[in-house]
Amino acid sequence: MGEATEAISYHQGFYGAAELEFRLERAEMTFYREYNLSKEPQRIDILVVVKEPDVQIENEVGKFFKQHNVIEYKSPDDGLTIDDLFKTIGYACQYKALGETVDQIPEDQITVSLFRDTYPRRLFKALEESGRTITQPYPGIYYVKGHLQFDTQIVVISQLTADRHSALRVLSNHAKEADVRRFLTESAALKKQGDRHNIDAVLQVSVQANGDLYGKIRRDDNMSPAFEELMQDVIEEKVEERVEQRVEEVRKEATLEAARKVRLEAIVSMMKNLNYTEEKAMDTLEIPAEERSMYMVWLTKI
């Protein structure tokens, strides 16, 4: 497992993976990321609106979809509890109430989906103990029935069929080499700008979470050309971030230098026109004690 030195923005990778997951049916859907439910920071992770109600989605995850589909994603380090489930159902209720006319968004056209990398054992136990039933129509995809406001599915990403859902599976912080290689191979064939943008988003997260694994694959001569091509945008973005960071540092340094020059001029003016000592002038300007020796050196050169 790669070591992460900073927080990993798994949600950004999930947004890209979700659009890649449904790329073959993308024209039939509209994706809304972090869909705002109110002026307060209450947001649906992803809202998927199927443009025509009679469209049949072939993707295993999307077979469950109706016209309005609320998606909640939990990163590998997050839990998934019964409260998280009902919070998401609450979001769906709020979304239903946002229609411009009464019942514009029909209850029977809303679904709720929760995604998590690993099996949520406690959640499933709580659901079964409360009288709900859980079925598994496809690997990693669980339908929850009974006493819920909307049709609900829970997707366990690590259990999804490996050869069909690589974009989702590589978001794990324990990604498998076979999944990464499959994702790289499949992604190399995608050339559309939107697809490439989503691939970059997935790679940004997956590489950060699994640095050692990607380093191993990168050293493999058989995989290197495809890897380098896919990673180019990621590498360039990292370089650009470092350049922008350095530019900001230089700007701050220049601003600080200019401020110190103004303070030095003020000290000289106070000493000349008000007959202040160096210390009194620096006291007046509230110059920090740790910087005063620097000003004293500059004053000796004037």
Image: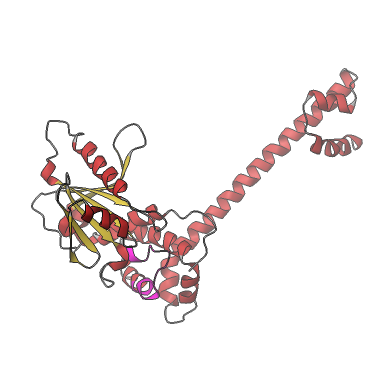
Placement of 154 over or under 188, stated as above or below = above
Residue 15 or residue 301, whichever sits in front: 15
Does 125 sit left or right of 298 as displayed? left
Q: Position of residue 299 (x, y in %)?
A: 88, 34
x 39%, y 72%: residue: 176
Q: Is residue 191 visible?
A: no
x 24%, y 60%: residue: 23
Residue 30 or residue 68, whichever sits in front: 68
Q: Which residues are magenta?
A: 168-182
x 63%, y 42%: residue: 251
Tell whether position 169 is magenta: yes
Tell whether position 290 is magenta: no
Does 12 sit left or right of 60 as displayed? right
Q: Which residue, as the protein is rendered here, is positioned at the far left? A: 54
Q: Position of residue 263 (x, y in %)?
A: 77, 30
Q: Is residue 42 visible?
A: yes
x 11%, y 35%: residue: 103
Q: Quadrant of residue 38?
A: top left
